[in-house]
Image (cartoon, rainbow, N blue to C red):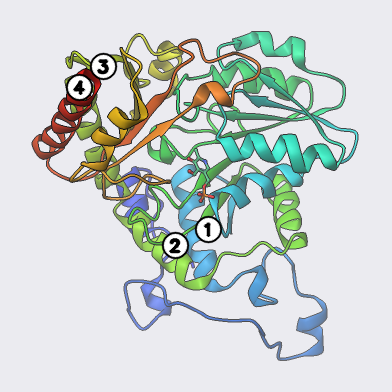
Amino acid sequence: MTRRKNFTKPDSILATAGRDPESNFGIVNPPVYHASTILFPTLDKYENRSPFDDYGYGRSGTPTQRALEEAVAAIEGAHRAVAVQSGLAAITGAILGFVKSGDHMLVVDNAYGPTRRFATTTLKNFGVETTFFDPMIGAGIEKLIRPNTKVVYLEAPGSLTFEVQDVATQAAIAKKHGAVVMIDNTWATPLYFRPFEQGCDISVHAGTKYIVGHSDAMMGLISCGSRAIFETVKTACQGFGYHAAPDDSYLALRGLRTMGVRVRHHEKSGLAIAEWLKSRPEVDKILHPAFPDCPGHENWKRQFKGSSGLFSFTLKDTHSRNAMAAMLDGMEIFGMGASWGGFESLILPAHPEQYRTAAPWPDGKQVFRVHIGLEDVEDLKGDLAAGLDRLTRAHNA
Ligand SMILES: Cc1ncc(COP(=O)(O)O)c(C=O)c1O
């Protein structure tokens, strides 16, 4: 399936990429193909099938998965993308393509927790060494590169604390030393951050978040900057048996169509709520890349086109567990649970101080990570205000 016109504007790409009604009875959306066995009409076709371009077995992809991959590659400006079963699988699949025993990897200190854990457990057991680096180290990353550094892994802004790295500078340095540069681009989406224009080789997404957008499917996507990178990633994912299920690929492709309008709404409401929280007496800091006191704000301004609906805040006082429970248990709109990027608002207490090793989290305290959904902003403020009031009442009791 191919995009019929060579659109360059993101909203037009989102609406048109990865679908071809003319080859599908005029039906707007590509169908869901369920498959394990895929038949070949001749011995010649069977023997000469391409593991990258043909359909050979359900596990390695169907036209439904390929449609999603095409659309994601188109919106991100990638050579091709590989869809897998979750965002974490996208991260591990991408990394595993490029490291072997005896290699070294650099990972930003504020990377998503399970990314860190994968490096410090599974990869360590496989003989791959990881050094975590301060997200604000900038060009200082060069000093950490070793002759056996094969991967430089970035995430901007980082999970929970939202510091933004100087991606372009770090990517250029890593490439000079022959390392593959990967970035987790889930937060900004391809709409607000362009990894390949900043020198990255691979962009990974938890498609589970803004791409699916409705909190009802898991999905991972690995966008690859070149044919060689794509073949390495696809080979690694095939080898590990990674697979994106057809129904989930369909849901992700459907989510992608409306991602532009949704993300702009998340951004606008997120900024409004963050500004409002800043004015609350209980709140200490807002951790949001668009705020000038966020470490790396200048990097964000220079390299990003916008922000999404996920950020954190800290409180001035230390509160008892009972006070926290009073605040969180009574929320009427904000749900408490993992993930983000869906239509609904979420709040989660988190402890970055427990993760960091290269650059201790300077505040040393718990954060509240919020995802601002598509609900009415005044209703969201009301829910948070009532929660903060309950917190204060329980604190003073
Ligand atoms: C920044 C980031 N990357 C990757 C992931 C992993 O995605 P998934 O939950 O689909 O495995 C998450 C999940 O929360 C995330 O927040």
Sequence-earlier tag: 3 or 2: 2
Which residue is nearer to you in this view: 254 or 379?
379
Q: Which residue is mark 1?
A: 69
Residue placed farthest to the bottom in the image?
Answer: 41
Q: Amino acid at mark 2?
A: Gly
Helix, strand or loop at label 2? It is: loop
Left or right, 179 with reference to 291: right
Tell me the tag on residue 18. 2
The answer to which of marks 2 and 4 sits earlier in the sequence is 2
- Quick one: 289 or 384, which is closer to the camera? 384
Cα distance, mark 3 to mark 1? 42 Å
Q: In the image, which is nearer the foreground, mark 3 or mark 2?
A: 3
Amino acid on which disc 3 is placed: Val
Question: Residue 33: x percent and y percent?
Answer: 50, 79
- Between the residue at mark 2 and the residue at mark 4, the CA separation in whole angstroms equals 58 Å
Q: Which residue is mark 4?
A: 397
Counting residues from the start of the chain, the first of labels 4 and 1 encountered is 1
Please indicate whether residue 239 sits to the left or right of residue 210 in the image.
right
* Mark in front: 2 vs 4: 4
Q: CA distance from mark 4 to mark 1?
A: 55 Å
> Marks 1 and 2: CB-CB under 8 Å?
yes
Q: Amino acid at mark 4?
A: Ala
Q: Secondary structure at mark 4?
A: loop
N-term-proximal mark, 1 vs 2? 2
Q: Choose mark 3 or mark 4, whichever is in front.
A: 4
The residue lying at 43 percent from left, 68 percent from top is 250
Closer to the observer: label 1 or label 2?
A: 1
